[in-house]
Amino acid sequence: MGKMVNLKIDGKDVRVDEGLNLIEAAAAAGVHVPNLCYMKGMKGVGACRLCLVEVEGGKAPVIACNTKVKDGMVVATKTDRVQEVRKFVLDLILSMHPLDCMTCTKAGVCTLQQYAYDFDIKESSFTRKKFGYPTDQANPFIKRDPEYCVLCSRCVRVCKAQGTNVLEFSGRGVGAKVVTAQDRPLQESGCTFCGSCVDACPVNALLEADRSRKGREWEYEKVDSVCLSCGSACGITVSSKDGEVVKISSAASEGAAEKYICAIGRFGFDSLNSEARLRTPMKRVNGELRDTSWEDALATVAEKLKAADGEAGFVSTANILNEDALALKKLAADVVKTKNYDSSVTLYADYDSLKGGSADLDKADLFVLAGTAPDQWARVLPALDAVIRKRVSEGGAKLLVINSGDPKIASAASAVLKGEEIAMIEQLAQAVISKGVKAPKEMVSALAHVDPSDAAMAAADLFVAAKSPVVLAAPSLYKAAANLSLIKEEAVSVPFEANARGVVLMGLVSEGKKFKEMLSSRSKALYVIGEVPVDKRPDTDFLVVQNSHMTDLATQADVVLPSTAALESDGTIVDYLGRVKEVRCTIGAASGTKSHADIFAEVAGAMGSAVKKGKEADVKKALKAKTKAAFSPFKREKDLDVDGERFIEAINKSTINGSRLLWLKESEKGVLA
Amino acid sequence: MKDNTVVRVCMGPAGIAAGGKAVLEAFRETLADRNIDAEVKEHCSSHQVGCLGLCARDVLVEIGRNGSKTSYQYVKPDMVGRIVAEHIVGGTPVKEWLVDETFDTFYRKQVKIVLADCGRVDPEDIDSYIAAGGYEPTREVLMTWIPDDVIEEIRMSGIRGRGGAGFPTGLKWELARRSKGDVKYVICNADEGDPGAFMDRAVIEGNPHSVIEGMLIGAFAIGANKGYVYIRAEYPLAVERLKLAIKQAYERRFLGRAIFNTQFSFDIEIRLGAGAFVCGEETALIASIEGERGMPRSKPPFPVNRGLWQRPTVINNVETLANVPYIIRKGWAWYASYGTEKSKGTKVFALTGKIRNQGLIEVPMGITLGEIIHEIGGGIEGNRALKAVQTGGPSGGCIPAGMLDLNVDYESLAKAGSIVGSGGMIVLDEDNCMVNMAKYFIQFTQAESCGKCVPCRVGTKRLLEILTRITEGQGKEGDIERLERLSRGVKTASLCGLGQTAPNPVLSNLRYFREEFETHIRDKKCPAKVCKKLLRYSILEEYCKGCGACMKACPADAISGDKKKPHRINPDRCIRCGACFEACKFKSVARD
């Protein structure tokens, strides 16, 4: 926390952090300063002129968005003079804006509508004009209607800040317009369809393409949850109406760097009702999968698991919830009594790398990306890519990239150490130590032979200068990279799946065969949970697939158990930063489906044992097990390198193929071809 | 024939337009002719120089000999032979081609400081500038002064920003010097864009090294090692001469590392503006140099604290910087001896419009408008009545003819509802319509608004709509009040100087010429007979001879009539082009 200052806003005394602008300070005093272009966490640009306020002693009104608080300041936000200016500005805006609030989807959440109401402006006192621009609705994600645009530039700035850089102004004066390069449709402009611009738009100029006549925002039921599509595990707000999801947006608080979700998180919900959705258990009879009852399916599974006699295997996605993982562990270890239970985590991480570390991305002033290469365009941990770029462009943070390849994010970096990652980490650590920074003795001696390059020495300056560096490492490099956190601040390992850390902490840590081994060796029974990157039936006598959607693997199974999809059950996960996040059921289980944990309990029941659904207390207990940071040799964990893009696409196959994302995938292919 | 003879041909913008290049070549060719005495050849040289000032009489040629000079006006290449033969060789000037007494009155009240060497030195020859004392101030400053001395000198001189805003230059430099930062910048704003203004262009084209020197001294004062000249691409000759000047300055090591063998180094780069008026606004200019779209940023932070790439930056106008070496050379007290208490020194104006002596003038601050118009300017063309003087371009306003006693300085002009501005001075006579004038400037600002903030983007458009309808006979009762309300709103609420001053031409015209607006709105008449749609053409039957000239001239077939009988104009077909009015020899076409 910085210094605090005291000021008076509209007669109210308020004490706020030094460095806040007057809009935030006023908000702290319970006063709303009207604005259309301000975005918390970003620099005020002063485009809309609505936030003009008067500061005692000042000659002219100042814009609150770009005026910092000072001790003893006396601010008036509602003087006749500024209210007149606001009314004037709104009057001008409304002279170029459709007055069709009665059919406008944005009604109720449109800021312009709100202010027109507040200032009692029924219509503009000036001659009304239309821009006459065409609408861009050539894609199924975002509808851009410049006719409604108030040119606040929020979309332009948000797109720039996160590095996608698709939108910009063209033209001058009243002919100014927000455009893509060459004014091409979005899909031809490098847009990733993350929809950040949609969240930023204060009016109806940018909207989800399918929202028309699907209800207004006040009719929606809104629940905060978590997107489980990848390791970013973004907070989402799910809006639903009549039991159907109609909209998903970022749940991160205004101004947080994490205010971002990608196209999968925002638009993948179509797949909840896709054709591939499973709604009844299935069983192979005479070589053919046929619908059957839960009772029959569970009995069959129970029988086969018993018969496997401890030689059964369980492989699960790491997208299941903590509660599911606890139940699975009990089923496998206590009821089926096998040592073979694992998650897809071991395809890209060692268990230890997922047990510790934490970081505050909003506070970090240096990001060190060790081997991990988030990429919005390839949809590999896109949110992390956006967060880092935003912190660099708006928050003044620096980025240091350590990578043997040429990741796209290197374009935002202050320094890049290109080369074999372990060698680069060693050089960086040694360079930092050589600049007189203290490090543990073992580390100093382990690095004695290392002679840092000039590039490493320059990169080390960034590390030395940083107050809160955060090392974000690919799991295989985590132990080596985490040594840097012994010198200063934090390090975390960045897995590809949302609850990778959770499933490990919940004990889904195999004492027998690991994921890969179970798939490559013969088994008597194999139980596959969730969408895992496996298409071909492994060599097993009996295959159970438990998933929300029919997959290639499921078509080859002996029994298929229909589970709830994401957004359909309650529970918790642990994200890569170690935060426990609540995943909340938003629309209830689809008919015929059961949650993973419930199915595990019922399988146990069918086997004559009881497995209680994991409770909050159990999760908490499991979370207590934390490892203490200690020096580890500078070594890479072996056989953990996977192609992030292919992996994430594989675990989201049903989502992508069952939603409008398929259009995006195909259009991208078209562009590439 | 012992004294050297120097021929100076005006190659300022107007000089070139009038054919200066051909005149210069004619002199060179004639002087090189084998029939010319070798001794004459040896002692006579011809040069191109920057604007000599009286553009209306271009091409101007000055012949200097024995410390005196003789000037010729309206010189054409075919006149050169005689001038050389009679004047240079023969020693007797060609009397009928010499400038008349107007020339003396044009220069008598002018004080040339920033333009002192403009018209003297060859802008493409650094030696010519050095011979005139150039780079001596820089040498002295770098070798014997400390930065604080420079700032004090400039502060005491009282010079204020010549770009229009009039911010004290010394204070700006001091703020930038005190601002913390390891890297600082000096930017020369050469994005001159006001309609009718060509002061900065003339300075750069006439004496580019003075600008480079000003930047050098400024950079030394604030601690900058890098400078940019942001110049509009529409000034190709200025760009070319500046490039050449920078190249020559590097060759002489006046730019680059260890200048005059001191610790000081300074580099200059040129950045071309792409034709956006708003890029003359300092924060938009910075954005443009940074490679962003040229849109203004809100202040604070001011450029002296966080400017180009977030570093402390001083942005000075061309004329301001070009004054600096002369202030250093002759001292602040000398400079401050010109001007008024609060507006020191001189100001360059581009005198244009309905004035006899159109041209580039430099006058001491505080001179009266009357002195400029009637003495320097030689009065109004065609003996018509002066109506007003527009100063400050699209950010300024009009001073009515009744206020010729007004002193031309920052305070007085502001009080009268206009501004000094960058130096455009447009003289208007009774044929200029003040509503149309306001419309013209709003049209300009409306088109040049960047579109970032609402009041300027939409407000100027609405102003233009109202002004347009008034000039087209669609004015409504209450439009004047609407204009006033809109103007006030746009002024108060706009983000940058462009919007904050855009309504000034409207407000000042309303202040002094309200009746003219009212006549347009209520009577649907344009007293100056400028607003086409308000004009009515008719044929005065008693004077019409039925010659048919008007009928032939009419492009719209609006005139009918039999030969030798009075003709008629069909008002529904008339497009009010005025062709009949011009064509009639008997003054029988009435226009009102």
Image (spheres, coloured by chain):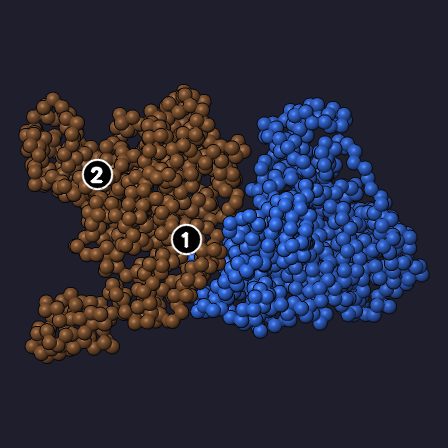
Helix, strand or loop under label 2 = helix
Circle number at residue B108: 2
Which chain is painted in brown?
Answer: B
For the image shown, how many numbered marks are present on the structure? Answer: 2
Q: Residue at x 87, y 62 (%)?
A: A602
Marks 1/2: CA distance? Answer: 34 Å
Does B492 sit above or below residue A562?
above
Image colour for chain A is blue
Q: Residue at horizontal 52%, vertical 40%?
A: B306
Q: Earlier in the sequence, mark 1 or mark 2?
A: 2
Amino acid type, callout 2: Arg
Chain identity of mark 2: B
Q: Which of the two discs, 1 and 2, sits closer to the camera? A: 2
Q: Residue at x 80, y 57 (%)?
A: A571
Residue hosting label 1: B501
- Quadrant of the drawing holding the N terminus of chain A: top right
- Could you say where residue A155 lies in the image, as x and y percent from the top left? 55, 56
Image mark 1: chain: B
